[in-house]
Amino acid sequence: MFEQAHSSAPFAGAAPAQGSFAFLWETPSGMAVVFGCLCLAAYALSALVPDTNITSFLLVRQDRWLLLAGFLSLLLAGFRLGAGAAPLRLGAAGLAVLAVALLAFGYLGHYLVLHGYNLSRDEQMADFDAAIFAKGLLAQPLPPLWQAHADALNTNFMLPVSRPTAWVSAYLPMNSALRALVGLFGDPALTGPILTALGLLALWQCARLLWPGEREPAIVAALLYCGSGQILFAGMTSYAMTAHLTLNLLWLWLFLLDRRAADAGALAVAFVATGLHQPLFHPMFAAPFLFWLLRDRAWPRAALYAAGYAAILAFWLAWPLFMHGLVTGPASATDRFGTDFFSRLLMLLFSFGSERWPAMAANLLRFFAWQPLLLLPLIAAALAGARQGRLTNTLAASAAIPVVVMLVIMPGQGYGFGYRYLQPALGSALLLAVQGWRSLAGRRAWLRVLTLRAALIPLLTVLPLQLWLSHDLYAAWAKVDARIAAAKADFVVVGNKKGGLWVDNLVLNRPDLSNRPLRLLTDSLNDELIAALCRKGAIVAVPQESLYRPIHQYFCPRPACVADTRFATLAPRLEAAGCVVAPLGAR
């Protein structure tokens, strides 16, 4: 397969696009029209779909403005392009500078832009598990009191076990294991930035292998990678998606080498990639490439990968059942659904109704809002010749499969930059865009100038807006979190969603419960737990509505004063049991 891929027709560049719509990707004005259509779609969808969930809310709050900024930037980039430019050039030293710049941007951004805060439960669980693994444990034992009242500590995104003897997230472990590994030598927050830099190098190598006689495709791939806000900002976080993207590109690099040792390395990477947090994402990326082994009748390689992936999937699908045995005891009870991956899939299949389509439309608009300006037009240029190039078909399938699968099982994504469930396959989308660039470059001399401008202008237009919007979102939660952490109390009881929008994520404790104050979910407090907490006169901080003001201001709801009402009813119960109640509001 890959000898052909490097030298002969099946993987050659697509033929020139024909038809009345070709101007959309063959002229700068057409490319601007494409981006303008995205803007209109975002504004229309934000008007039609109520912002009742995070995805639609962020489409309104962030992404329609990013799309507008991208549209204006593309108009500016296409102004007076001239006749052409010299071939693009970037050497090893320049590539190394880009990689170091990505690392520095991600690490500084984690603290200066995102306040060093884990906003979503996905981010929190990555560091939660990493803290457990750093101690050499697979699950953190719970004291007897908290075994009986684990729900009050917030067990969301954990195995569905009541009265557990230990706790750990329900995710697969390798993303957290990578963070624990980096933590042995430095700050675990370096994990995402390091992976982002390595992803650039892996993408470069993939492009060099796919188009070995050309230097420009790898450069275009690098520019698109560095221009993806989704890659840049996800790299600041503990989301597993950065590791998914990098390991998938590393896998593809080894796979394209077509050597026995490289195939063994690819399977080792596949083991880690499949076990990062959910087992679906890497197989969805790899499947179209593995399919060509069958088409080329490369039976020994196909057998090797089939056996390897069978073992990998068997191991990781059994992992939750193994972990279930570590966290349960004689008094534990387990829900029927949610422990193994198959029951989770069944739950997801029946969790969404007619809102699937608008949710996925919002996801895709969010995706392109955080991508480089030329990504969609160049993908369109590549797909225009899809029938004449199997590389194009393979890359397109690898990028499209996650969209179709997630539409069926989980169209909502919650927080994230762009559409994070597509990030594992973003390498395929970038390489597909490079294929589109190749199909145009020989016939459109202005494309090199446009490519450089489209890479540089957003640094002054789109990127500052992305920085501000991301900082604004994380700041609202980080302020409230810091106020809770500074409370002079033994415990803080935080209301569930009724006490502030999605404030249950504020209830995050260290795995060993060594933090003070301990954070508890108000709705999980019962008389037995209150009696145990108050027996020695503990100080319990109870939030007032003013504590949640930064979150309310960001999401623009009218405060319902639920927290004040809860304070009035909960404080007497705590005081009657012997606790000292301290109001917790804004400073």
Image (spheres, helix red, strand yellow):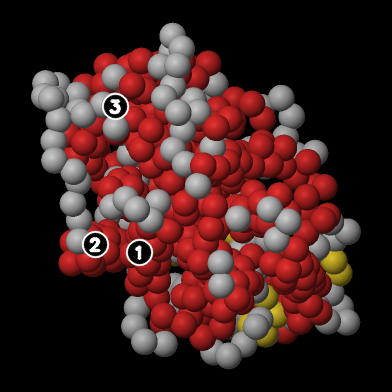
Three-letter residue code for mark 2: Leu
Query: To which residue does mark 2 refer?
Result: 95
Mark 2 Cα-neighbour bin, 10 Å: few <14, some 14–19, many ≥20:
some
Q: Quadrant of the C terminus?
A: bottom left
Question: Residue placed at 29% from the left, 19% from the top?
Answer: 27
Q: Quadrant of the N terminus?
A: bottom right
x and y percentages locating residue 207 in the rendered image: 40, 54
Query: To which residue does mark 3 refer?
Result: 443
Q: Which of the 4 image quadrants contains residue 535?
A: bottom right
Give yes or no for contact between labels 3 and 1 (Cβ–Cβ under 8 Å): no
Residue extending furthest toward the front:
8
Q: Which of the 4 image quadrants contains residue 321?
A: bottom right
Query: To which residue does mark 1 refer?
Result: 201
x and y percentages locating residue 556 in the rendered image: 40, 32
Three-letter residue code for mark 1: Leu
Is 81 placed left or right of 106 in the picture? left
Q: Earlier in the sequence, mark 3 or mark 1?
A: 1
Q: Earlier in the sequence, mark 1 or mark 2?
A: 2
Is 5 placed left or right of 460 in the picture? right
